Image (spheres, grey):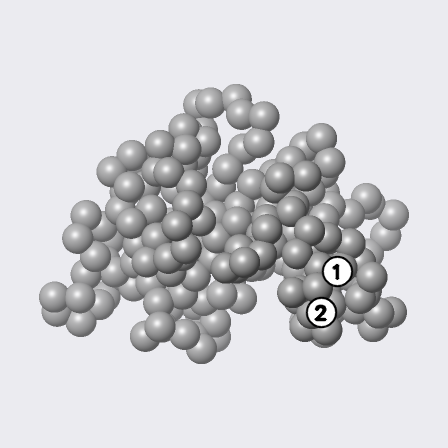
Amino acid sequence: TEFPFLIHDLRAHYDAGLIGVFHTFMSQFFPIPDEMDPVDVWLTNLSPGETQLVPMFALAVIDSDPAPGQGTPGCPMGRLVGGVLFEYYKSSNAGLLSYICVDEAYKCKGIARRLINLTFECLQAQAGLPALGGPQEGTSTTAEMAVRALSRADLSKAPKGMVAEVVRLLEPEDTRFALPGPSPFFALFAETNALGVEDGVMSA
């Protein structure tokens, strides 16, 4: 089935105004104070002309044919309905999925899965791995593996050891990867914040 929405790469097609609009859109889904990076950080780290220690990437999902009056102000292409922002850490060959969201009215349309697949493909390219078209059906990505492990976790008992808790809870069924052959695999982590839980990954 053809994906009915536009995917706009905010790093490849840098536009400071649109990045600001995208930041405002994403902020409504992350209401915890200081959970979102300031927009100035995004403007700097998404600039393709910059040589960053940790390059940032952002993909916006846009409904190019919204109902009358439902377009996003400042977004000439239509209505922003989802997005993802992630980073690549070359020194550890790891990706960090910092923010992902889908507008409530557009859920269950495959948007989040498409964003995860595209994140996977972009990080593969950054890591110098062959393009495999994202995770394959019936196999596990690192993100999905971690989600399954976290579903078995009582995070209230491990606020300072999130990564260790994920590793402890992994089971053999979780660790089937989509990448064949001897190529080294990069790790993809998803950052989360919750009230009363210290962000131990970023402060370590």
Q: Quadrant of residue 46?
A: top left
* Residue annotated with mark 1: 166
Q: Position of residue 99 (x, y in %)?
A: 48, 53
For the point 41% across and 74% down, the residue is: 107
Q: Is residue 51 visible?
A: yes
The amino acid at mark 1 is Val
User: Could you tell me how many numbered marks the image carries?
Assistant: 2
* Residue annotated with mark 2: 153
Q: Give the side of residue 133 with respect to residue 184, left or right.
A: left
Is the C terminus in the top left, top right, bottom left or bottom right quadrant? top right
Q: What secondary structure is marked by label 2?
A: loop
Marks 2/1: CA distance? 8 Å
For the point 41% across and 45% down, the residue is: 34
Q: Considering only vertical position in the picture, is 51 above or below 25?
A: above
For the point 59% across and 51% down, the residue is: 198
Q: Give the side of residue 153 with respect to residue 22, left or right.
A: right
Q: Give the side of residue 188 with respect to residue 191, left or right.
A: right
Q: Give the side of residue 98 with respect to residue 138, left or right.
A: left
Q: Position of residue 151 (x, y in %)?
A: 68, 72
Q: Considering only vertical position in the picture, is 89 above or below 147?
A: above
For the point 52% across and 22% down, the residue is: 51
Viewer-proximal residue, 123 or 198?
198
Which labelled disc corresponds to residue 189? none
Viewer-proximal residue, 182 or 166?
166
The answer to whether the residue labelled 2 contacts the one labelled 1, judged by CB atoms less than 8 Å apart, is yes
Q: Earlier in the sequence, mark 2 or mark 1?
A: 2
Please rate how many residues cluster around mark 2, counting C-alpha atoms within 10 Å: few if below 14, some from 14 to 19, many from 20: some
The amino acid at mark 2 is Ala
Q: Quadrant of residue 10?
A: top left
Q: Quadrant of residue 65?
A: bottom left
